[in-house]
Image (cartoon, rainbow, N blue to C red):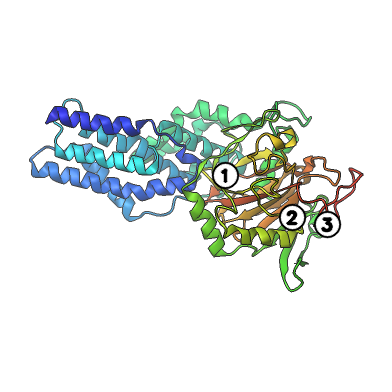
């Protein structure tokens, strides 16, 4: 019986052990993790009960951990805070793993209760597509320090759930030891700070990646579109915290009702920047459509990528973009055609999605992770326009315009910022930001370099619809002079 059981347990473990995913890169996946923890708790309850019936001694850690997690499950709430995400991942990576190690120790007799307990893990692991790894926990800690770096809050208060009580300049992570000394009886706090302390050196190395090369000349890191420049990074961080425009510039911005291709239909529009014009259209996507995009994409999510090489059009996962992405086409999901038609009506551009020579790309739906962000970049593809795309758009030309739908509200953080023009667009569910990526003569407009600020508290969902050059001949004719401003929306 013991040999058969060991083989059974080993098969289940090997079958799923190598299925990995970056849980930290999407709040949606962390929410699934939280929802499935109740099933692990039930499995542990059954295991302990069966052991007690058989007269087996129960390890003290299992009893204490079950008591703690039952209380957590009773007070369960959505995973919106990076600290909540940290504690969740720490339980899965350290505590739950210890539970399975205790139940399946090499000296233990493995009978039905042990087999059932391990099979519960295997089923959940299969359902989730993997099991959280140490890298998820490390990345979450790095995210917390990245948030600290950008938003300049008091990190010690933040770890206790207080945000923006006091500003705190960049200091050594060694200050965290002070709180641990102040509360020696708080075991969870002690364990957390020990972990943070052990990660200090690597975290500090990683978080300072934003501190860029020592130069004031804007440059593109070899063959990518990610910008690193001292003044830009400074503006990026500042814009994430607050508005940078003067009162005089702000006084020129206004709201209005924009006419569309249908005379009786007008859109609530907000001018977020002038020269170049950046618009925010309000109430342009319904709650039902938002739910459809989020629900349909949720099972298709994979880690977001960036262009690795412009000349080859290759993509890669990078830590300057923390999110998960899914792509939805109008053809596969016809209900999306209604939204696409609305984009045409509002922008005046051709937006029909086709399998060849498409006017637009598929809908890109994105959910950001712990401290999720996308550092300064351009949407324009340059020479990669014909290499990084599929057959639907590889002959459709440049991304001339971006429509970014906001599919959720965010409690703190997550703004879309444009460092070169000091513009800032806050996240508002049901709204859509719009801007052109090229000048009238077709050249890429580098002023439109933008970034997604780190999400401090909340879950940020967006959907991008990129409009290509193809089909715009009579809708947006090219201009002969580079400096001319676009008079169309």
Relative image position of residue 305 (x, y in whole percent):
58, 36
Who's the residue at 73% across and 37% down the image?
232
Can you tell which quarter of the image residue 385 is in?
top right
Instruction: Report the side of 116 relative to 162 (left or right).
Output: left
Q: Mark 3 points at which residue?
A: 488
Q: Name the residue under label 2.
A: 350
Which quarter of the rendering shows the N terminus? top left
Can you tell which quarter of the image residue 391 is in?
top right
Task: Give SS at disc 2.
Answer: loop
Mark earlier in primary sequence (2, 3): 2
Task: Give SS at disc 1.
Answer: loop
Can you tell which quarter of the image residue 394 is in?
top right
Vertical relation: 409 (above or below) 416: below
Mark earlier in primary sequence (2, 1): 1
Relative image position of residue 360 (x, y in whole percent):
68, 49
- Distance between the alpha carbons at the discs numbered 2 and 3: 14 Å
Q: Residue furthest front?
A: 356
Specify few, some or many for label 3: CA neighbours under 10 Å numbering under 14, 14-19, or 20 or more: few
Specify few, some or many for label 2: CA neighbours under 10 Å numbering under 14, 14-19, or 20 or more: many
Which quarter of the rendering shows the C terminus? bottom right
Instruction: Report the side of 97 relative to 63 (left or right).
Output: right
């Amino acid at each position: 019986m013991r040999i058969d059981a060991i083989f059974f347990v080993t098969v289940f473990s090997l079958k799923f052990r190598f299925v990995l995913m970056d849980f930290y890169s999407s709040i949606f996946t962390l929410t699934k993790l939280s929802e499935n923890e109740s099933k692990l708790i039930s499995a542990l309850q059954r295991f302990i009960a069966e052991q007690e019936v058989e007269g087996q001694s129960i390890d003290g850690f299992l009893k204490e951990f079950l008591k703690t997690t039952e209380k957590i499950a009773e007070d369960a709430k959505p995973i919106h805070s990076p600290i909540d995400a940290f504690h969740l991942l720490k339980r899965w990576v350290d505590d739950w793993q210890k539970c399975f190690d205790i139940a399946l120790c090499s000296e233990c007799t493995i009978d039905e209760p042990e087999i059932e307990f391990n099979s519960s893990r295997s089923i959940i692991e299969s359902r989730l597509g993997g099991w959280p790894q140490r890298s998820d926990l490390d990345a979450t800690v790095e995210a917390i320090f990245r948030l600290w770096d950008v938003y300049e809050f008091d990190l010690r208060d933040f770890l206790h759930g207080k945000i923006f009580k006091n500003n705190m300049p960049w200091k050594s992570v060694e200050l965290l030891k002070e709180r641990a000394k102040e509360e020696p009886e708080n075991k969870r706090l002690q364990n957390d700070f020990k972990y943070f302390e052990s990660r200090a050196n690597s975290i500090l190395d990683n978080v300072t990646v934003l501190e860029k090369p020592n130069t004031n000349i804007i440059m593109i890191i070899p063959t990518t579109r990610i910008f690193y420049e001292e003044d830009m990074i400074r503006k990026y961080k500042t814009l994430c915290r607050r508005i940078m425009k003067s009162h005089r510039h702000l006084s020129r911005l206004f709201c209005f009702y924009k006419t569309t291709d249908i005379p009786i239909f007008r859109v609530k529009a907000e001018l977020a920047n002038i020269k170049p014009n950046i618009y925010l259209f309000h109430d342009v996507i319904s709650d039902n459509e938002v739910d459809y995009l989020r629900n349909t994409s949720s099972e298709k999510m994979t880690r977001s990528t960036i262009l690795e090489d412009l000349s080859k059009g290759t993509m890669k996962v990078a830590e300057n973009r923390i999110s998960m992405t899914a792509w939805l086409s109008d053809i596969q999901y016809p209900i999306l055609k209604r939204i696409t038609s609305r984009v045409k009506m509002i922008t005046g551009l051709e937006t029909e999605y086709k399998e060849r020579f498409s006017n637009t790309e598929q809908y890109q739906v994105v959910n950001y992770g712990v401290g999720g962000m996308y550092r300064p970049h351009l949407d324009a593809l340059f020479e990669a326009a014909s290499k990084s795309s599929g057959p639907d758009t590889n002959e459709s030309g440049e991304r001339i315009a971006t429509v970014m739908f906001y599919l959720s509200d965010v409690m703190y953080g997550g703004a879309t910022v444009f460092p070169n023009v000091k513009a800032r667009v806050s996240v508002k569910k049901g709204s859509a930001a719009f801007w052109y990526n090229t000048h009238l003569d077709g050249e890429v407009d580098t002023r439109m370099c933008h970034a997604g600020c780190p999400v401090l508290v909340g879950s940020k969902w967006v959907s991008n619809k990129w409009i290509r050059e193809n089909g715009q001949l009579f809708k947006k004719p090219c201009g002969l002079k580079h400096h001319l401003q676009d008079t169309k929306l």
